Amino acid sequence: MKYEEIINHPHYEPKKHPRMSREMRAGQFAPFAALSGHASAVRRTAKFAELREQRIIESNLDDERFDIMEL
């Protein structure tokens, strides 16, 4: 079918399943609002991992300096 053939057809309305109200439809998507703090939690975790990695690298450098000083 081409668009020109279907443009004037009425919108399909199912007989067995009535349309969902706007309130019910909005409630269906409400659980995604719980993810609003997810991005900041990921940023905090990344920053923590970065600082921890930096501390480990600095610690390893200190160990290497100590080994060199013993020679």
Image: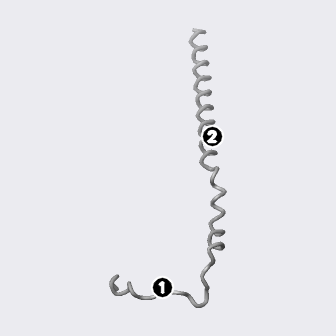
Residue placed at 61% from the left, 89% from the top?
Answer: 16
Secondary structure beneath disc 1?
loop
Q: Amino acid at mark 2?
A: Arg
- Which residue in the protein does label 2 denote? 44
Height in image: 2 above or below 28? below
Position of the N terminus, as image quadrant, is bottom left
Height in image: 61 above or below 69? below
Residue placed at 59% from the left, 48% from the top?
Answer: 39
Position of the C terminus, as image quadrant, is top right
The percent position of residue 57, horizontal first and vertical second, equals 58, 26
The percent position of residue 50, horizontal first and vertical second, equals 58, 34
Nearest the camera: 58 or 66? 58
Q: Name the image quarter holding residue 59.
A: top right
Classed neighbour count for the residue bearing mark 1: other residues with Cα under 10 Å, few (<14), some (14–19), many (≥20): few
What's the colour scheme?
one colour
Is residue 5 rendered to the left or right of residue 67? left
Residue placed at 63% from the left, 53% from the top?
Answer: 36
What is the CA distance from the residue labelled 1 to the residue labelled 2? 48 Å
- Which residue in the protein does label 1 denote? 11
Nearest the camera: 69 or 4? 4
Height in image: 45 above or below 55? below
The percent position of residue 61, horizontal first and vertical second, equals 57, 20
Which badge, 1 or 2, is on the more N-terminal residue? 1
Secondary structure beneath disc 2?
helix
Closer to the camera: disc 1 or disc 2?
1
The percent position of residue 30, horizontal first and vertical second, equals 65, 64
Q: Amino acid at mark 1?
A: His
Classed neighbour count for the residue bearing mark 2: other residues with Cα under 10 Å, few (<14), some (14–19), many (≥20): few
Height in image: 59 above or below 37? above
Residue placed at 66% from the left, 57% from the top?
Answer: 34
